[in-house]
C-alpha cells in the first residue's frame, strides 16, 4: 500500500515507536544570548518515555505550542520531534473550542456547560487527520503508535485505515463520563469509532473503562466482555480491542531526589518564615480550572475562619493557581470569581503580619514546588472531577520525612490508589471543613502511618511502570494479531 507523503524534512518510515500528542514534549524558549531554543517540558510522560524513545528510535508528533509557526522536524535528546503546525483559527476551533469547550466540560461531568458547535467539529476532524498523516509518514513497517488524550480521539481509526500494519494504542488522560452525559455529544458515534481504531484503549480508572464499554454497547451495539470489545473488521471478521484501566503516575524518584537536596529543604524553611511561621500551612496547587474545586476549597476555608475554628495567626492557605486556557470564556469567568473570593476573604481576615490566603496566579519550576510541598502540613486536592491528579502523587513522593496530610477528593482518579488519604466529597462543605480540621490536628504518629502507606504505592507504581505495562499490553495485542494472521494463512 502506498504510504502518505511525509511532512517536509521528516525521516520517512523509520520510527519503531511513535507518540502522537497534542503538544510536543518541549517548550520554545529564548536563551540568555537571545537565541530561540527548545527546553524539555516538565511533564512526567516525557520523562517516562525518554528511555523507551531512545531505544526504539522513537518519534514524537505534536503541536509546538504557538500559532502559525512552521518548524522543521528535529532531533532532541534521542527523540525525533515532528512539529504539526496549527493556524490561529485552528487553535481557536480545534484546541480552545472542540477540545476545551466541548470535550473537556462534557468529560468532566458537565461541571461547566459544553458547547456543541459544528464548525469546531469540522476543524477537529481536519486537525486530527493532520496528526494521523504525520504519524503514518514517520512510522516504520509494523511500528507501534501511541496516541495521547482527548484532543486526538479520531487519530486511532484514521491511522488504522491508512496503515493496517501498525499496532495502535490510545491513552485517555481525563475521565470518560457515564453514558447519560456522553450521549449528549452530537458526534458520539464518530468518537467511539475513532477510539476503537486502537488495539488498546487505556483509561485512568476502572469506572472510566466501564463507562466507555457501556457507550460502545449502547451506540455501536458491539459485544463487550470484561475488558475486551469485539470490533468488526471491514472484511466481516472481528478483532478484540482492549479497554482497560492503566492509572498514570509520576517520576517518583526525581521528587525524592529533589526533596533531599539541602538547598530545597532550606527553601522550604524560608517559605514558612516568609509566611510568618504559621503553626500550619495548607496548600492547593492546580491549573486554574473549574474541575479542580478551588471555589469549594475557598468556601470551606472562609467558613472555618468565620466560625473561628482557625485564625490567620495560626493557619495560612497557600493557593498556587497556574494560568491555563486563558482565552476560553469559562476560564476567564472562573479566574474572576476566584480572585473576588480571595480578595474578600483576605480583606475580612488579614492582619498586618498574617494573611489568610497567599494566592499565586503563576507557574513555578519543580524545585520551588517541592519546597512548597515540604513546607505544607496539609495538601488539599478537592477536585470535582479529575482523571488522576498528579499533584496528589507529587506531594506524597516529596514527603520523604513521612509527615504531612493529603486531603483527597473521591472524584479524583488518584483516590482509587490512595485510600490512606483523608477522603472528602468536595460538594459537602461541612464534611470538607471537618476533614480539614482533622488534617490540621492530626497527631504525627497517624500522619506517619498514613504517609508511609501512600508513599509505598506511589514509589512502586511510578510512571515508568505505567508506560511499561501499557506498552506490554500493546505487545500482547501485536502477537495476538500476528498469530491470527498466521492461522488465516495456513487455514
Ligand atoms: C490535562 C490534559 C492534558 C493537557 C493538560 C494541560 O492534564 O489531560 O492533555 O495537556 O491538561 O492543558 P493544556 O490545554 O495547556 O495542554
Image (cartoon, rainbow, N blue to C red):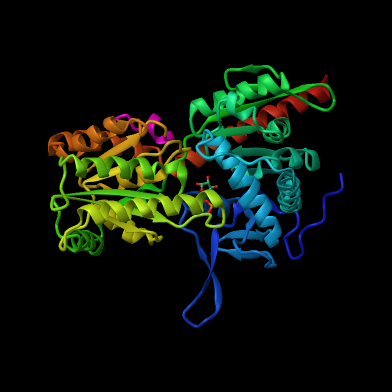
The spot of residue 81 in percent (x, y) is 63, 60
Q: Quadrant of residue 232?
A: top right
In magenta stretch: residue 416: yes
Q: In what quadrant of the picture does the C terminus appear?
A: top right
Query: Which residue is at the front of the view, 337 or 117?
Result: 337
Residue 18 sits above or below residue 204 on the image: below
Q: Quadrant of residue 116?
A: top right
Q: Which residue appears at 34% of the width and 50% of the height?
A: 341
Can you see residue 472? no
Query: Which residue is at the front of the view, 301 or 208?
Result: 301
Can you see residue 466? yes
Q: Which residue appears at 52% of the width and 81% of the height?
A: 34
Q: Which residue appears at 63% of the width and 38% of the height?
A: 169
Query: Which residue is at the front of the view, 261 or 32?
Result: 32
Q: Which residue appears at 36% of the width and 38% of the height?
A: 460
The spot of residue 88 in percent (x, y) is 68, 62
In magenta stretch: residue 309: no
Q: Which residues are magenta?
A: 412-422
The spot of residue 369 in percent (x, y) is 33, 56
Image-based side of 341 in relation to 166, left or right? left
Amino acid at each position: 500500500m502506498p504510504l502518505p507523503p511525509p511532512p517536509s524534512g521528516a525521516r520517512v518510515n523509520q520510527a519503531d515507536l511513535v507518540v502522537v500528542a497534542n503538544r510536543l514534549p518541549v517548550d520554545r524558549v529564548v536563551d540568555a544570548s537571545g537565541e530561540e531554543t527548545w527546553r524539555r517540558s516538565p511533564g512526567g510522560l516525557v520523562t517516562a518515555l525518554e528511555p523507551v524513545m531512545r531505544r526504539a528510535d522513537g518519534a514524537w508528533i505534536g503541536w509546538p505550542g504557538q500559532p502559525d509557526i512552521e518548524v522543521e522536524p528535529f532531533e532532541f535528546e534521542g527523540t525525533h520531534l515532528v512539529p504539526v503546525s496549527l493556524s490561529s483559527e485552528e487553535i481557536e476551533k480545534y484546541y480552545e473550542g472542540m477540545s476545551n469547550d466541548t470535550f473537556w466540560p462534557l468529560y468532566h461531568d458537565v461541571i461547566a456547560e459544553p458547547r456543541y458547535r459544528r464548525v469546531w467539529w469540522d476543524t477537529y476532524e481536519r486537525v486530527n487527520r493532520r496528526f494521523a498523516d504525520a504519524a503514518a509518514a514517520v512510522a516504520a513497517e509494523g511500528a507501534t503508535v501511541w496516541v495521547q488524550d482527548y484532543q486526538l480521539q479520531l487519530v486511532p481509526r484514521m491511522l488504522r485505515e491508512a496503515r493496517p500494519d501498525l499496532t495502535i494504542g490510545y491513552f485517555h488522560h481525563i475521565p470518560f463520563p457515564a453514558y447519560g452525559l456522553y450521549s449528549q455529544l452530537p458526534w458520539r458515534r464518530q468518537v467511539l469509532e475513532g477510539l476503537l481504531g486502537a488495539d488498546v484503549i487505556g483509561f485512568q480508572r476502572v469506572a472510566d473503562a466501564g463507562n466507555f464499554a457501556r457507550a460502545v454497547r449502547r451506540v455501536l451495539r458491539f459485544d463487550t466482555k470484561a475488558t475486551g470489545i469485539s470490533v468488526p473488521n471491514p472484511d466481516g471478521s472481528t478483532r478484540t480491542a482492549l479497554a482497560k484501566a492503566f492509572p498514570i503516575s509520576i517520576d517518583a524518584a526525581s521528587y525524592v531526589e529533589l526533596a533531599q537536596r539541602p538547598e530545597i529543604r532550606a527553601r522550604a524553611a524560608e517559605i514558612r518564615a516568609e509566611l510568618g511561621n504559621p503553626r500550619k500551612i495548607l496548600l492547593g496547587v492546580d491549573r486554574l480550572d473549574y474541575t479542580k474545586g478551588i471555589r469549594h476549597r475557598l468556601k470551606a476555608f472562609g467558613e472555618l475562619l468565620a466560625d473561628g475554628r482557625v485564625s490567620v495567626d495560626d493557619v495560612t492557605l497557600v493557593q498556587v493557581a497556574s494560568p491555563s486556557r486563558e482565552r476560553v470564556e469559562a476560564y476567564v469567568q472562573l479566574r474572576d470569581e476566584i480572585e473576588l473570593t480571595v480578595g474578600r476573604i483576605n480583606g475580612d481576615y488579614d492582619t498586618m503580619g498574617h494573611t489568610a490566603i497567599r494566592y499565586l496566579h503563576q507557574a513555578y519550576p519543580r524545585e520551588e514546588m517541592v519546597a512548597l510541598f515540604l513546607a505544607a502540613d496539609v495538601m488539599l486536592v478537592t477536585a470535582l472531577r479529575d482523571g488522576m491528579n498528579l499533584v496528589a502523587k507529587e506531594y506524597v513522593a516529596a514527603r520523604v520525612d513521612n509527615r504531612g496530610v493529603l486531603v483527597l477528593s473521591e472524584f479524583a482518579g488518584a483516590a482509587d490508589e490512595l485510600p490512606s488519604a483523608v477522603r472528602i466529597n468536595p460538594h459537602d462543605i461541612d464534611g470538607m471543613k471537618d476533614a480539614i480540621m482533622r488534617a490540621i490536628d492530626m497527631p504525627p504518629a497517624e500522619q506517619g502511618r498514613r504517609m508511609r502507606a501512600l508513599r509505598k504505592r506511589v514509589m512502586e507504581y511510578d510512571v515508568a511502570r505505567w508506560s511499561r505495562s501499557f506498552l506490554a499490553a500493546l505487545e500482547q495485542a501485536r502477537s495476538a494479531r500476528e498469530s491470527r494472521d498466521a492461522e488465516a494463512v495456513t487455514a
